[in-house]
Image (cartoon, rainbow, N blue to C red):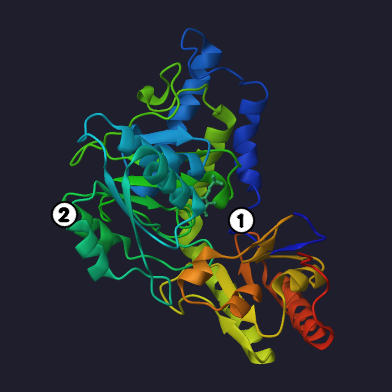
Amino acid sequence: MNDSFIYLDHAATTPLDPRVLEAMTPYLTSNFGNAASRQHPLGQEAAAAVERARGQVAQLIGADPREIVFTSGATEANNLALKGVAEARAYERSPKHFVTARTEHHAVLDPLSSLEEHHGHAVTVLPVDERGVVDLELVDRALGQGPRLLSLMHANNEIGTLHPVAELGRLSREHGVLFHTDASQSVGKLPVDVDAMKIDLLSLSAHKFNGPKGVGALFLRRSSPRVRCAPLIDGGGHERGRRSGTLNVPGIVGLGAAAELAASEMMEESGRVAGLRRRLEDALLNRLEGVHRNGPAEERLPGIANLSFEGADAESLLKRLQGVCASSSSACTSAQLQESHVLRAIGATESTISSSIRFSLGRSTTESEIDLALDSIVASVEAERAQGPLDSCQL
Ligand SMILES: *Cc1c(COP(=O)(O)O)cnc(C)c1O
């Protein structure tokens, strides 16, 4: 892959698996048909490829292929799930009530804010504990107030916390509340079964599990209960009217191929990645003073280590980490310092947040990369502590 960098930012995006690229290539070149052109062989070939991919995605999460709607990614899938249910005419007339938690991705929190601010719906945002987990009793109480939908992510993208989705699904079903989960970080890495977990809507994204960017899917349960979801995008009636627009055939084929690879390799791969993450975390905790883990010790994604380094500025540290790609939880934009709402929600102090770095490992990560990265991180933290921050954040 790219030899000049050690890429430890797989929670942001993952490299395309070469086998996925190989599956996509014909649909970028010779097989360029529109999947809606059923009258000729090129269109028929594209449509067949899309249906194969639909089956591969459905298989990965235990769904029926007819329950899969292809989208441009998880952001769109979340928007479609939340706004689609809010707008669905089959449900009671507005306003509807939604329940979520503080550590959700902005692709859930922002559509919900919009529904609340501009469309008169009600939103309850639950707190989480220091591990980033919602209190099931609080969830139970909120569900007792008769909301239409509960949206809680399976795995957190910053600190790797896993929510007890099967429990949440069971509670939702008991209360007759729809359960949506943003599973962008867990699909392809951990087993997900929409029936066993009683999930009614699920968002996923290809580029988080070695597929291409710009393609994802929303699972919409067809029966018991049948989920009603109004389209965000109207047009040619593609995807059974749920998402119009010419299908991104190569992207969808890539999503399907990535799903099939993940299904067969994830168990072994997750064990390997968890081992490498432990190697990284343990060594940093041993070799440096003042290193703290953000997030849970157990019940977590295999590949995410979010650590704070006392006395270091994360932005400055990332600059010093030449050749190691990771991400900080606070970002200096042109005008403002944006702090991680996730670290805030688990009670982290300002100084913890500003000294926190997320290292996220994936399929392409090797043991020798971890060992090289370790030396570089230790040296950078020591330099940072000795010299103070590089002038990274001029506000
Ligand atoms: C990456 C991510 C998204 C956004 O997915 P896109 O396909 O990039 O739009 C949403 N939620 C979570 C938890 C993510 O990690």
Most extreme residue toward the top is 39
Left or right: where 95 falls relative to 186: left
Q: Mark 1 points at which residue?
A: 12
Q: Does the residue labelled 2 lie within 8 Å of ligand 1?
A: no
**Residue that badge 2 annotates:** 175
Q: Under 8 Å from ligand 1: the CB of mark 1?
A: yes
Does residue 318 lie above or below 150 as drawn? Answer: below
Mark 2 or 1, closer to the camera: 2
Q: Which residue is drawn at 77% across and 72% down?
A: 316
How crowded pointer 1 is (Cα within 10 Å; few <14, some 14-19, many 20+) is rated as some
Is 353 positioned to the left or the right of 57 in the image?
right
Q: Is residue 318 left or right of residue 263?
A: right
Q: In what quadrant of the picture does the N terminus appear?
A: bottom right
Callout 1 amino acid: Ala
Q: Where is residue 65 in the image (x, y as percent from the top left)?
A: 35, 35
Q: What element carries label 1?
A: loop
Q: Pinpoint residue 311: horizontal percent, then vertical percent.
A: 70, 85
